[in-house]
Image (spheres, rainbow, N blue to C red):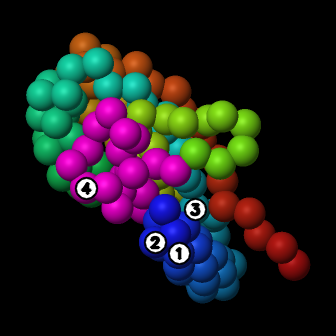
């Protein structure tokens, strides 16, 4: 347990430093980055694994980048990628965070024929909750 907490602290520090550096770089760009946060409950592991394998190159093709891909206790083979619940009893089966350079890039991905086809596979294998947020800048 102590090693998980230490690992989590190291990951959080790395993420905070990365976001700070990216934020400084992004201030020079014309639009804030866009993040999609997904809470996914997997019902069919085999079908969902097929989805994750096939969707990754499509995400990248449309400018997306995976920042977090973690599996809960019921999914995933690597305990280092386990979702560790914090406050509020939130314990997603899978937690995914993706990044795009703009809302336009994200919309192109969402509306693409490739993603629309893959959405059916995701919907048949998992339940998804998601939010879209823009990068936050301070002066």
Q: Is residue 51 left or right of residue 132?
A: left
- Does 14 appear above or below 30? below
Residue bearing mark 1: 6
Q: Report x, y in % for residue 132.
A: 59, 41
Q: Which residue is mark 3?
A: 33
Q: What residue occupies the far front of the structure in this picture? A: 1
Instruction: Residue 36: tell me if it is visible.
Output: no
Q: In which quarter of the view is residue 111 placed? A: top left
* Earlier residue among tags 3 and 2: 2
Q: Nearer the viewer, residue 6 or 16?
A: 6
Query: Residues at badges 2 and 1 in contact (C-beta under 8 Å)?
Result: yes
The mark nearer the N terminus, 4 or 2, is 2
Q: Looking at the picture, does residue 34 appear above or below residue 29? A: above
Which region of the structure is painted magenta?
67-84
Q: Which residue is mark 4?
A: 78
Provide the secondary structure element on which disc 1 rests. helix
Q: Is residue 72 magenta?
A: yes
User: Distance from label 4 to label 2 (Cα)?
Assistant: 14 Å
Provide residue 4's location: percent of width, then percent of height: 47, 65
Characterize the local packing of mark 1: few (<14), some (14-19) or many (20 or more) Cα atoms within 10 angstroms. few
Residue 3's disc number = 2
């Amino acid at each position: 347990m102590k090693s998980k907490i230490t690992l989590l602290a190291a990951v959080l520090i790395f993420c905070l430093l990365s976001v700070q550096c990216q934020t400084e770089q992004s201030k020079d760009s014309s639009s804030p980055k866009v993040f999609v946060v997904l809470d996914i409950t997997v019902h069919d592991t085999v079908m969902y694994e097929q989805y994750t394998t096939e969707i990754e190159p499509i995400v990248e093709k449309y400018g997306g980048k995976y920042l977090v891909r973690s599996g809960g206790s019921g999914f995933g083979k690597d305990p280092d990628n386990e979702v560790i619940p914090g406050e509020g009893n939130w314990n997603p089966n899978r937690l995914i965070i993706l990044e795009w350079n703009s809302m336009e890039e994200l919309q192109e991905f969402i509306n693409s024929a490739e993603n629309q086809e893959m959405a059916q596979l995701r919907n048949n294998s998992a339940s998804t909750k998601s939010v879209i947020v823009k990068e936050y800048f301070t002066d």
